Image (cartoon, rainbow, N blue to C red):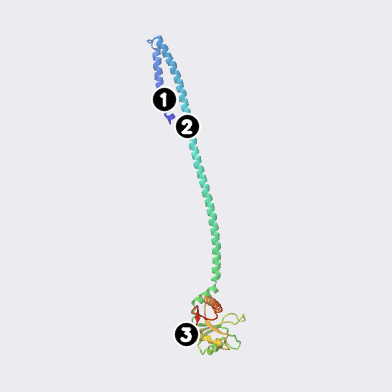
């Protein structure tokens, strides 16, 4: 900045020097001056010329320095632009790398979700197949309170299942109207197939169920027992209760344990 101010002041210095030189030459050419004065003026003129040459040299140096400063400023500006460009390039590469990583992770996550969704879909389709769906709906909607399940009742080629069930209930001094009697399972399988009996109302079903304990004292029906018509879930819960009841009886044989209303309780008799 100092160089630029000096450069702006140069025209004024050169103008003042020129005026002084002109004045000195006027004095030198004047006829009024003596020889001694003219000699002094000539010396002053030489000194002035020498000073002017030095001033011109200094001016040239200042101009050269200002030119270099301007050149350096241009280089600095170009360097700044290069740094900014490098930063932008690095930032762009970083963003691209992050985007690539995020894209890969999203694709992997999407693949996992798709695999899981496919597995769930297949499971749902299998679980909700038409036949299974109809069975599940029927199982949830049917009122089982009027039904009884008879286990261990031998099958006969001569007598129908309805006749066998009527004979069983007559042994308990009951003769209800049977709305439906059906063997469950395929014929010829292992064991005796159970019989589902549908009665007119739940009171009759409860009465027969309460008297079914008498069958264990019968020579003919001691291997037959009557139970409520339970769903798959209820049968699983009942099976678990029966297993726990057996364990309780084995661990505490001196007590009488029974299942009542879904709980294992101690009985006095």
- Distance between the alpha carbons at the discs numbered 1 and 3: 129 Å
Tag of residue 203:
3
User: Residue 54's spot in the image, x, y percent?
Assistant: 46, 21
Dot 1 or dot 3: first in sequence order is: 1
For label 3, the SS is helix
Q: Can residue 165 be seen in this view?
A: no
- Tell me if label 1 and label 2 are in contact, CB under 8 Å: no
Q: In this view, does 120 lie above or below 224?
A: above
Label 2 Cα neighbours within 10 Å, binned few <14 / some 14-19 / many ≥20: some
For label 2, the SS is helix
- Distance between the alpha carbons at the discs numbered 3 and 2: 114 Å
Query: At x 43% / y 30%, what residue is drawn?
Result: 2
The residue beneath circle 1 is: 11
Query: At x 56% / y 65%, what residue is drawn?
Result: 119
Dot 3 or dot 2: first in sequence order is: 2
The residue beneath circle 2 is: 69
Query: At x 39% / y 14%, what residue is drawn?
Result: 27
């Amino acid at each position: 900045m100092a160089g630029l101010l000096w450069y702006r002041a140069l025209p004024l210095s050169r103008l003042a020097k020129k005026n002084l030189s002109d004045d000195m030459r006027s004095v030198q050419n004047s006829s009024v001056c003596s020889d001694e004065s003219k000699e002094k003026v000539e010396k002053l003129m030489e000194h002035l010329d020498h000073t002017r040459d030095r001033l011109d040299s200094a001016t040239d140096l200042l101009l050269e320095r200002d030119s270099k400063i301007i050149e350096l400023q241009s280089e600095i500006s170009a360097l700044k632009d290069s740094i900014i460009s490098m930063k932008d390039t690095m930032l762009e590469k970083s963003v691209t790398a992050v985007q690539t990583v995020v894209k890969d992770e999203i694709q992997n996550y999407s693949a996992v979700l798709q695999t899981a969704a496919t597995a769930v879909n297949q499971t749902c389709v299998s679980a909700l197949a038409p036949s299974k769906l109809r069975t599940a709906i029927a199982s949830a909607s049917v009122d089982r309170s009027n039904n009884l399940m008879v286990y261990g009742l031998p099958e006969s080629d001569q007598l129908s299942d309805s006749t066998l069930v009527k004979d069983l209930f007559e042994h308990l001094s009951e003769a209800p109207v049977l709305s439906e009697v059906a063997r469950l399972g395929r014929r010829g399988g292992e064991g005796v197939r159970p019989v589902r009996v549908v009665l007119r109302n739940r009171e009759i079903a409860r009465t027969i169920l309460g008297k079914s304990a008498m069958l264990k004292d019968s020579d003919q029906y001691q291997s037959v027992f009557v139970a409520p018509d339970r769903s798959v879930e209820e049968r699983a819960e009942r099976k678990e209760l029966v297993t726990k009841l057996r364990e309780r009886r084995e661990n505490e044989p001196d007590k009488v344990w029974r299942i009542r209303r879904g709980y294992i309780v101690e009985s006095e008799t």
